[in-house]
Image (cartoon, grey):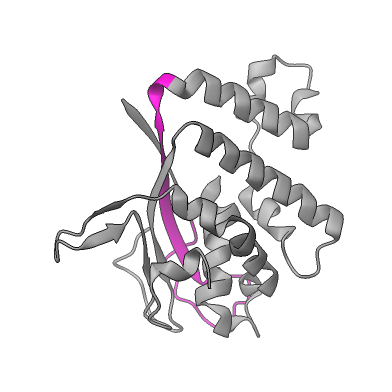
Amino acid sequence: MQLCYVDESGTAQTLLNTDPEQQPVIVIAGVSLPERNLTAITQEWIELKARFYPAITATGHGWLDAILQDIKGNKVRARFRARATSRQKQHSVGVVDGTLKILERHQAKILGRIWIKPLNVEHNSMSLYLLCSAVLAPTACAVYAGAYAGWNQHCDPGYIDIRERFGARLRALTFTWPYPRTGKPSSSVIVSDPVGRHGTRLMWGP
């Protein structure tokens, strides 16, 4: 049996250029993992968290309690920004790299949808955070919503580095399936981009 962990990043709030703190993309994505590997995945994930966030396991509680201590994706991606120090960036590179190694080792697959928000358009029909807010969302912000970089803090050009380092590995974690409307092969991660009208391919490389 497969287990699927689903997360989201962003809101359906109308994008306005007077609000530089609002994320210009919405991501809903899942990670599918074999249930038989759950114990090993849990242990490896705790070990990764302890290596990069030692305070998590220094609380005096049991070792397994570390799984309850959340790693905020927005803090991981913030260290990829252009103004981040080399040490900060290397820390986030280590976290993302370690996470992907766990997913790769256990034959995980990713699936989801990414919406690029045009300016001044309501999204009432889109009532819509590990992987989503730390990797997929910042990549989409820089790649598809770069035109907003002059006023929106989420479109930092430093986020392109996430794609350059991890894009090919992320693509390898996707799969194809026949799209119901056309019957043609479609990626398990789909980008809807009414702003630049670009396809999903740019998520993984130039």
Question: Is 13 or 108 nearer to us in this picture?
Answer: 108
Q: Quadrant of the N terminus?
A: top left
The image quarter containing residue 182 is bottom left
The residue positioned 14% from the left and 64% from the top of the image is 181
Is residue 165 on the magenta stretch? no
The image quarter containing residue 150 is bottom right
- Residue 142 percent across, percent down from the top left: 58, 72
Considering only vertical position in the picture, is 79 above or below 143?
A: above
The residue positioned 53% from the left and 51% from the top of the image is 169
**In the displayed structure image, the side of residue 44 where residue 6 appears, left or right:** left
Q: How many marks?
A: 0
The residue positioned 50% from the left and 63% from the top of the image is 204
Q: Which stretch is magenta? A: 9-36
- Residue 17 percent across, percent down from the top left: 56, 84
**In the displayed structure image, the side of residue 1 where residue 45 appears, left or right:** right
**In the displayed structure image, the side of residue 33 where residue 151 appears, left or right:** right
- Residue 42 percent across, percent down from the top left: 56, 24
Question: Is 121 or 35 nearer to us in this picture?
Answer: 35
Q: Is residue 129 visible?
A: no
Q: Is residue 73 visible?
A: yes
Q: Residue furthest top?
A: 62
